[in-house]
Image: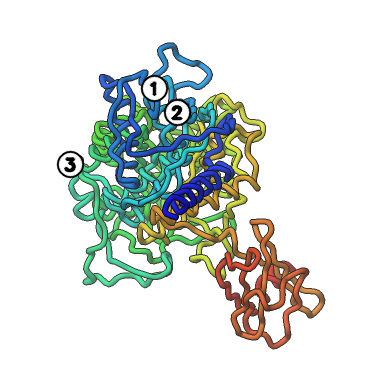
Amino acid sequence: MKQISLLLTSFLIGTMVVAQTANDIAIIPQPVSLEKKSARFMLSGQTKVAADAKNAEVQRVVRMFTDKVKKAAGYTLAAAAPGAKGNVISFAINKTADKSIGKEGYTLDVTATGVQVTANDAAGLFYGVQTLFQLLPKEIESPVVVKKAGWVIPGVHITDYPRFAWRGLMFDVSRHFFTKEQVKDYIDNMVRYKYNLLHLHLTDDQGWRIEIKSLPKLTEVGAWRVEKTGTFGTFTPPADNEPRTYGGFYTHDDIRELVKYAADRFVNILPEVDVPGHSMAVVASYPELSCTPGTYRVNSGEKFMQWGNGTFYALVDNTLCPANEKVYEVLDKVFTEVAQLFPFEYIHMGGDECAKNFWEKSDAVKQLMQKENLKDMHEVQSYFVKRVEKIIESKGKKMMGWDEILEGGLAPNAAVMSWRGSKGGAEAANLKHEVVMSPNNHVYIDLMQGDAAIEPPVYQTVLLTNSYAFEPVPEGADPKFIKGGQANLWTEQVYNMRHAQYMTWPRAFAVAESVWTPKEKKNWNDFIRRVEDHFTRFDVAEIKYAPSMYDPIFNASKDGDQLKVEMTTEVKGLDIYYSFDNSFPDRFYPKYTQAVKVPVDAVNLKVITYRGKEPIGRMVVIPVAELKKRAEKKK
């Protein structure tokens, strides 16, 4: 009987393993080429790892692999000599470079007897390891040891390499401060999906986040503000006696530590110092740098800009004065220290959303215009940008700015980061300037990712489908000047790391695929299948993500006096159930099949989505009054 029991147990384990490996492989971003094999490899405590012991970079990649295996599986994988056979995972640098895969590409072969990852460079091995983790069961993401019957890797042959060299995420650490350890965590999560560029937005109206030793007030004053909670941009102005205790900054040593941490994971860090607008923290620290005499304070989230239909102006002057020579002396000191701390070849100088209404009133600016023969305020800003470019280039760096730096004439060697759609990027590329694409309608991941009825409020929505539709090469642009693309996480409304994760994922999955995977291999339905697999991995890793793709999208309109609502979902195959009677719908409630007429006296529409018998979306409650407002706007 005992023998039968053992045979049955063995059969069940085998069946479980086969079932596990029979599932479709779910790699994000989708590799260039993936061929499935019938064989599978079983990772165990007896598995060994072979790699060149003399290559420090290769050994670092191997340690990252073995450390994660030990943390999740409990196995300490012993070393084997390069070329060892049988139950071995090998990492090798090609003796003769394979030009087809470049520096960051790799090949990965999984057979019954072993795993082989090869690349031209350690960076390629690192990205091969990220793919290898995604081939392992989801429990590999566990922060504690998980006992499993089998750690199975399905048989594959993968050849993979990136479409673009620049694959970035921008993290705004100014509006809300994130610690050095939290930035490291952000790096750890982004490299899972083969991102290689972290853009740190270090300065803005709400805080200066980098130590400049020659200008100590930038952090003594500019890094601190009154703490407020609620909806950013609507706060009451702080009183003079309220303590300015919220904030923080990175010391030189912090920056060096972050740069090394990123470099160990093949990530460059692009520093941004946003000038001449977005400079309230600077003028609060050194008021003499403003064109407008007065007393300034770091903005705490109270309103100080007026936004209209494509126009804006400042209620309080938050700009540096382009006619003040002291401004350029200060920026020379700033960029001297920034250039010494960040080895990356570019420095980002911002240049966006500069309100010029106070410049228009400035006698000093009027004199500058006359002296330099500047026709309008765009040319005044262009004058400033060109001066800044010379400063940055004098430090041995290249300058990059938001696409507003095109206005009034582009600085001679400037690279452009195009955020206001794709037009600016196409224009800059055709002027033979390097371009990084980050159009707000696709990759601004601070924007709502579902209906405003349930998402934290922001002025606009970018759905997962919008992010997946991101194409880094704009129509009509010269592609050889498009360096790549990135998603941007502004943090006015992001107060903590868990919410930063929620806003980043899954839209950063979509952007990762847009900048790594060949355009012709992208497929929305298959992408969603893979996203759902990675949701389960994030559950194990305890990383937060947004389930917004399961929630309904509402379209309210009027049919005469009758209010009606159409509902759709981004993910196909879901059923929508609803109620108007204030009770909570489930799958026994009316199922949406066509536009719903809203009862005259209804107060709320409640909706939930199901896949089969299981609820998958969140309970969404949207007031009928809100639906009426949306319908009225369309008239």
Q: Nearer the viewer, residue 474 or 188?
A: 188
* Whether residue 356 is situated above or below residue 63 in the rendered picture: below
Q: State the residue lying farthest toward the right.
A: 560
Instruction: List the single residue furthest toward the front.
Output: 1
Q: Residue at left 40%, top 26%?
A: 86
Query: Which residue is identified by label 1?
Result: 85
Q: What amino acid is found at the position of numbered circle 3 in the picture?
A: Lys
Q: Distance between the residues labelled 2 and 1?
A: 8 Å
Q: Position of residue 150 (x, y in %)?
A: 43, 44
Quadrant including the C terminus: bottom right
Q: Distance between the residues labelled 3 and 1?
A: 55 Å
Q: Which mark is residue 113?
A: 2
Question: Counting other residues with Cα less than 10 Å from the Cα at mark 3, is it few (<14), some (14-19), or many (20 or more)?
Answer: some
Q: Which structural element holds mark 1? A: loop
- Which comes sooner in the sequence, label 2 or label 3? 2
Mark closer to the observer (2, 3): 2
Q: In which quarter of the image is residue 339?
A: top left
Q: Is mark 3 on a helix, strand or loop?
A: loop
Residue 194 visible in the snapshot: yes
Sequence-wise, the earlier of marks 3 and 1 is: 1
| Label 3 sits on residue | 213
Looking at the picture, how far across and down is residue 436, in whole percent?
50, 35
* Residue 408 in sight in this render: no
Q: Is disc 1 surrounded by few (<14), some (14 to 19) or many (20+) residues within 10 Å?
A: some
Residue drawn where x is 51% and y is 37% of the image: 154
Q: Which residue is at the front of the view, 232 or 125?
A: 125
Mark 1 is on which residue type?
Lys
Instruction: Identify residue type, mark 2.
Output: Thr
In the rendered image of this protein, does residue 446 appear above or below residue 40? below
**Numbered badge on residue 611:** none
